[in-house]
Amino acid sequence: MEWLNPGGATAEVTWSTALLPCLMAFALTQAIAGIYIFTFRGLSYSRTLVQAMALGSIITCMLMLAIGNNIATALGIAGGLSIIRFRTTMRDPRDIVFVFAALSAGIASGLRAYAPAVVGTGIFIGAALVLHLVSFGTRQQLDGLIRFITPAEGDASALASAALKERCRMFTLVTLREVGQGREM
């Protein structure tokens, strides 16, 4: 079964050799998360997404350290992870890119490929900053989201539209629904 481990015996990962890659993954991901926070322009900021980036990079780093160059271990871990179903949907493709960047920093750190990890993270951060500063791809920026509750009496949609027309240059009424067991909209 030598073909399952083409590099021969996997070098043992000691406490000291595991510490630097995990810290490197965490530090790089903090930089990625910081740029994500700084450049975020969406309507619904998720603190848990930023934390997931940092924690995900440590997990991927740990997995890469555990796998080493052992194909059998890699297949076992992949099989074990295949039972996990993530039901969180990411509505913004930009969020997915940032999560992928964080996981990539963790993978590179776990492989102890520090130069690609640092250089790749640096270029990613630089590109994200430049795209943010020059407003690349921006056509129209939403100014805000207003959520309010109004009594259910009368035509709530017409009342809301009239109030918004008075105070806003442009608006879009996204949704209107009953709350408070039909007493409010």
Image (cartoon, helix red, strand yellow):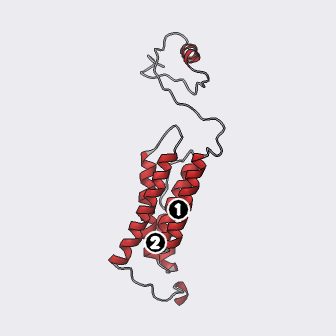
Left or right of residue 46: residue 142: right
* SS state under label 1: helix
The image's mark for residue 179 is none
Q: Quadrant of residue 15?
A: bottom left
2 or 1: tag closer to the N-terminus: 2
Q: Is residue 183 above or below residue 38?
A: above
| Residue picked out by circle 2 | 110
The amino acid on which the numbered mark 2 sits, given as a three-letter code, is Gly
Q: Identify the residue at horizontal 46%, vertical 53% (top origin).
A: 33
Rendered location of residue 174, percent (x, y): 58, 27
**Crowdedness near tag 1: few (<14), some (14–19) or many (≥20) residues, C-alpha within 10 Å:** some
Circles 2 and 1 in contact, beta carbons < 8 Å: no
In the image shown, does 20 or 51 lie closer to the viewer? 20
The amino acid on which the numbered mark 1 sits, given as a three-letter code, is Gly
Q: Identify the residue at horizontal 53%, vertical 59% (top origin).
A: 101
Q: Quadrant of residue 22?
A: bottom left
